[in-house]
Amino acid sequence: MSVNPQASPSAGPALRVVSGGLDAVRAVVETAQPAVFEDDEDDEGGGGGGGGEPPSRRADLADCPVKPLGHHDGTYYFLSPTGELRSMKVRDFSANGLLSLFSGDQSWMVTNFQRLDKDGNPINDFIVRGVVGHLIRICEAVGLFDPGLRLRGRGVWPGGAGEDGRPVCVLHAGDRVARIAGGVMEWHRAGYWEGRSVYPARPRVDVPDFNDPASAADGGRIEELLGLWRWEGAADAMLLTGIIGAGLLGGFPDWRAHGQIAAAHGSGKSELCKFIAGVMGPQAEGFNSYSEAGLRQVLADEARVAILDEAESDGGGAMQAVVGLIRRMSGGAGADIVRGSPSGEVKRYTVTGVALMAGINPPPLAPQDRSRILRFDLAKVTSDPEAAARVDAAVAWARANSARLRARALLGAQRYSASCKVFRAALIGAGCDGRQADLFAAALAGRDLLLHDHPPDTDSIAELLSPLRPRINDLRAADAEDSDGQQCWHHLLGHIPDHWRSGTRTTIGELIAGAREEPGGQGENDIALRTYGMRMIQLEGGGSALLVANKHPGLTRIFHGTPWAGGGHAGALKRLGEGVAAHDKTERFAGPSVRCMRVPADLLPERDWGVGVTATQKRDSDVSRLSD
């Protein structure tokens, strides 16, 4: 047997070429020693690759420019060095993928996970497996990724409590974040993380001019310039100023009011939108063609102002869907939206901030919308030849002073919150319900934010509420008329069943009115009502009432496709008034006995005798009916 050792200077132990059969091979294997490398004692088990190069020579890796957010189901979440939110699966952890995650800067990876050449000399490259091991470990240390983590994009947000316990105002300007409390600012790079809220990097926008914020006189200039347009309401310019002021705070307020501008043709609607957009600057986004889905995607995780021109009623559900989104943007964190995908991935995001709609024929507002959206009516402008020039100058002034006005609003954000509470209490005392008080308080506090430097006093509040009283009364009356109970009741009374009288069809309301005049509840009208789940009864103390079954096939057909389907009408009718209550026993309605609601006589319709019917003719008809 002969053995000729041939050593490679860079391959570790010498490779011995053996001749002499299996016994000789066995002898070599039994006497072989494990390969020992210079840096094996530094190997913490997370590197490998590249012929045994060390994963890292450093024990402290806390200065990693990539920040971990956690992991879930094989996906790892990070904030890149520029503050961008990134998610990576195992297959994405290639050399190029890591360079992308580290924003193209490999210096940290080379410093901590440097690759060696075949001679053991360091080179300007990194060990992929070592970097990947480190990233996975720091994500595992954070734990499972929190799907409820609030991702906050550009705009204005509520931060955590400051030293005085009040919420801090946070401005996200795309590449940097300002934390503002008591007029003091702290600037952070995008990727700032506070509590369960993270502010990832977004496209950069111009920041407010905190060195020269606008004065109260500048804020008053907004209301003055709004007077260039012709408003039908005496308080419209004042309230719209407030909506603009509150809009500059984006998602910071606990409750946000929106605006709807109903503009006559030739009223200067589009120029008004330009003026408002000029004041807002990058705090606003303007649209003149949109859908609810499009707005959701554009405004996702942002807290700004959406200026929606050409907000016209379309006779269908498209614009109502937009109004519904705006309604959900009002309270708390705004519209919290969850959407799934065919692949099983779930996307969750928030749409918040303030919206201003403007149209010639705006969509009608339901009661739940009127408590969140203030309507402003804009009349046609005069033929003054100088009017257009004055409006152009107003738009130019707004654009030139936007940065200063935004700074004023942000520096006074905490004062806005205090003013809002004061105005709300005063409005409750003036007879508003909670939602109406929230609506007007948001607008009044927004105006106060722009026009004053101190919280409102009792005298100023009384002065402001005086011109608002007609508007508050109109809103209360409209809400009472269009309440859920009233809408349900009107739908029931106006329904036209398959019931004929004298060759014409009649409504449920007419059947009820006729049944009230029939003795003993056994007349034609009452018998017809029973087939629809209703009947008249005589009360023991005198008088009559209408019983409405909680569930009945006839009522199922009447309320099919409405918000009161499936027996929901029973709960809605309870809200008609205090006299409406559950009947004390079950009753039969052309079928089995069921539970029912009792509606008192003062809410029931009476027969409409029509135009030209005299009192004598009505009396003669009553006598004739009673004699029968």
Image (cartoon, rainbow, N blue to C red):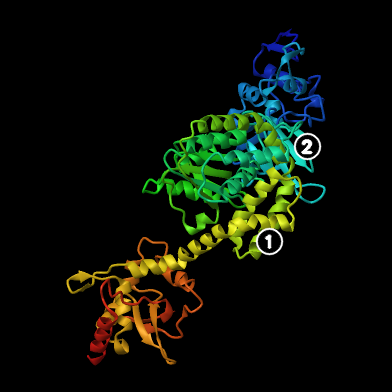
- Residue 250 at x, y percent in the picture: 63, 42
621 horizontally vs 202: left or right: left
Closer-to-camera residue (95/197): 197
Mark 1, Cα crowd under 10 Å, few <14 / some 14-19 / many 20+, is some
Q: Residue at x 39, y 65 (%)?
A: 565
- Residue 49 at x, y percent in the picture: 68, 22
- Residue 71 at x, y percent in the picture: 64, 40
Closer-to-camera residue (77/435): 435
Instruction: Indicate the amino acid at tag 1.
Output: Ala
Q: Please, is residue 478 above or below residue 48 in the view?
A: below
Kindly identify which residue carries mark 2.
185
- In which quadrant will I find the N terminus? top right
For the image shown, how many numbered marks are present on the structure?
2
- Residue 30 at x, y percent in the picture: 74, 23
The answer to whether residue 300 of the structure is visible from this angle is no
Q: Which mark is residue 628?
A: none
Please, what secondary structure does the residue beneath circle 2 have?
strand
The answer to whether residue 448 of the structure is visible from this angle is yes
Decide: marks 2, 1 in contact (CB < 8 A)?
no
In the picture as drawn, the residue positioned furthest to the front comes out as 384
Please, what secondary structure does the residue beneath circle 1 have?
helix
